[in-house]
Image (cartoon, helix red, strand yellow):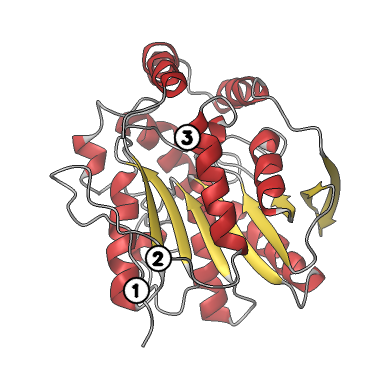
Amino acid sequence: MSLSIPAQFARLFLRNYVRPFVLHGPHHPAVMRTGVAYSLGLIPKPFNVTTRTLYAGDIPIVETSPRSPRNDAVMFYIHGGGYVMGSPRTHQAFISRLANAMQCIVWSPDYRLAPEHPFPAGLEDSVMAWQTFASTFTGKRLFIGGESAGGGLSMAICLLAKERGFTMPDKMYLQSPWLDVSLSGESYHHLDHVDALVNVEVAETAFARAYSGHYSRQNPLISPVYGDLHGLPPIYVQVSDAEIFYSDSVTLNQKAIAAGVEITMELGHGLWHAWPMFAPIIPEASASINKAAQWLVAETKPSVTPMPAQTKRYTSLHTAHAMSE
């Protein structure tokens, strides 16, 4: 399926104007944070939600609530930004749309960022916020998710929950997740010049080094794709076949199936990293938010038509359910 006209224009703009700035602009954290706050601030926010700030210990949490939230399920959403940028406020437009699509209250932690606070600071904050979230909403279905680095933190929380015995979410939503901070997958090389937003050099110098610090990047809590996935909740993944992080989701798909974990893959053919963040600018973004929301709130497992691979090199990526026997 070809991209919509708005998506074609958006991709052209990203490729020709945003990507050069990302690749060659200053990579000082303060400059990047200002840039992402300005860029995401241009996306219109829905008016039919309310927000307030709560705290889990010293960690701020932004609660986003639609006008008539459902009382059976809640969402814990962790923002992305390479572990260096972003906040619940910069991501408020997307979080509000997700809350509306699910009709769920959403909590989003304002975790500490690298390089001032490298691993494990952001994970520690997110875990504390998650445990507060789980104890606040006992008896409800609990969802967790995030885009990019937020997807990595979501999976790391699940791995820790399994290891330490605290509350596991019922479902997990990963949007263009960054699951391999070692940048070792094939797509980091083969799609380096295709990605409309970033390349491997920037991912390495601006984000991966800042977050991992002196820890091994193959530590599953830094790069969850190296973890044992047995016992994880059902996962919904949205990933583009034109982003450098593509391999992370391919590997996740393979390992989840081998571990007996239910996983559903939505492939954004020809789109870019974390494209659902662009709602309502492109129709593909709004459609993907609705798909994820429907999957999350569904009481039963959805019926999904298998998706054929869109590239010759990555023949293993498909829509699949691997059910525990």
Residue at point 77% right, 76% down?
A: 138
Q: Secondary structure at mark 2?
A: strand
Work out whether residue 312 or residue 291 is closer to the camera in this orientation and state it: 291
**Which of disc 1 and disc 3 is earlier in sequence?**
3
Work out whether residue 264 or residue 120 is closer to the camera in this orientation and state it: 264
**Which of disc 2 and disc 3 is earlier in sequence?**
2
Q: Secondary structure at mark 3?
A: helix
Question: Where is 172 relative to 257, above or below?
Answer: above
Which quadrant of the structure image shows residue 2?
A: top left
Disc 3 crowd rating (10 Å Cα; few below 14, some 14-19, many 20+) is many
Residue at point 60% right, 71% down?
A: 299
* Mark seen at residue 263: 2
Q: Position of residue 282 (x, y in %)?
A: 51, 27
User: Disc 3 designates what residue?
Assistant: 284
309 relative position to 151: left or right: left
Disc 1 crowd rating (10 Å Cα; few below 14, some 14-19, many 20+) is some
Residue at point 42% right, 19% down?
A: 5
Q: Position of residue 296 (x, y in %)?
A: 58, 61
Q: Amino acid at mark 3?
A: Glu
Disc 3 to disc 1, C-alpha distance = 27 Å
Q: Amino acid at mark 1?
A: Ala
Question: Where is 258 relative to 70, above or below?
Answer: below
